[in-house]
Amino acid sequence: MNLENIVIVLCRPEESRNVGAVCRAMANNGIHTLRIVGKKEDFDEERVRILAIHSAYIWENATFFDSISEATSDCVCAAGTTRRRGKKRFKLQLPEEFASTADTITQSNGKVAVVFGNERTGLTDEETDQCTVGVTIPSSPDFASLNLSHAVQIMCYHLFRTNRSDISGCTPVSLERLDRTVKSLADSLQEIGFFSVTGRDDMEQFWRTILSRSGLSEKEAQYVEHVFNKAAGFSKKRDRKSD
C-alpha cells in the first residue's frame, strides 16, 4: 500500500472539531492528504487545531472543492462510506475488502479517495452517485451511526494495516506446524531415554492436545523446541562426563 496515494474526502462536514479529530486519525495511520467539499472560511480554525494537536499540518495543507467529483477527479477510485443500502447504492464492501482493492491501485501509483458524508445526514444519493464503490462499517443496529472521526479512524487503520505487513499480532501456528514441534519435543525426550519401550505415541498425543489449546505462536513453538533440545543436550553431556 502506498499511503501517499490515499486521499480522505470530507463532504460538507459541519463541526470544526470533527475536522480536527479527522486530521489526528489520519496522522495516526500515516495518511496525510485531506480534501474537503466546502469552504475553508466556514470552519473555526482554532477549534480544528484543538483536536488536531500535532496533526494540524494536515488541516493547513487541506484543499477545498465544490463537489465530490472535483475532489476526486485525479483519483482512480472513489469509495463512498455509508451504512444505508438504497436501491441505487452499489454492493457495499467491508473496510478490509476495500483495503485490498486500494492496495492494488496505489501500488500502481493510482490515487484512491475515501469519501465521508456529513455528520448528520451521511452521503446523499446524489453524492453517492459521484463515487465508484461503496464501503460500510458494520455496527450495532441499536446505534449504527458512527462519529465522523471514528469512521475515518477505522478506514485509515485498515489501509495502514495493509501497508504495514511487518506488524502482526500473535497468530497461532497450524496443526501441521504444531506436529513438528511435538515431534521435536518427543525426539528430545527419546534421546534422554524418557521412553523405555513404549509410550511415545501417548506422550505425543498428550502434548499435541495441550499445546493446541494454548494457541502457540511461531516464536513460542520455536522456544519450546529450543528448551527441549537444550535439555537433551545437557543430559547427553552429563552422561559423557559420568562415563
Image (cartoon, grey):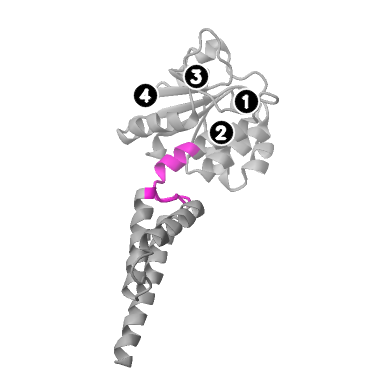
Query: Could you give the CA–CA distance between mark 4 and mark 1, rounded to whole angstroms?
Result: 24 Å
Between disc 1 and disc 3, whose residue precedes?
1
Callout 3: few (<14), some (14-19), or many (20+) C-alpha neighbours within 10 Å? many
Look at label 4 and name its amino acid. Val
Look at label 2 and name its amino acid. Val
Between disc 4 and disc 2, whose residue precedes?
4
Magenta stretch? 158-175
Q: With respect to residue 183, does 107 lie above or below?
A: above
Which one is nearer the viewer's eye here, 13 or 204? 204
Between disc 4 and disc 1, whose residue precedes?
1
Callout 2: few (<14), some (14-19), or many (20+) C-alpha neighbours within 10 Å? many
Query: Could you give the CA–CA distance between mark 1 and mark 3, rounded to whole angstroms?
Result: 13 Å
Check the picture and name the quadrant holding the C terminus.
Answer: bottom left
Q: Is residue 170 magenta?
A: yes
Residue 68's disc is 3
Between disc 3 and disc 4, whose residue precedes?
3
Q: Which residue is mark 1?
A: 13
Between disc 2 and disc 3, whose residue precedes?
3
Q: Position of residue 196 (x, y in %)?
A: 35, 72
Query: Could you give the CA–CA distance between mark 2 and mark 3, rounded to whole angstroms?
Result: 17 Å
Q: Which residue is mark 2?
A: 152
User: Circle 3 — which element?
Assistant: helix
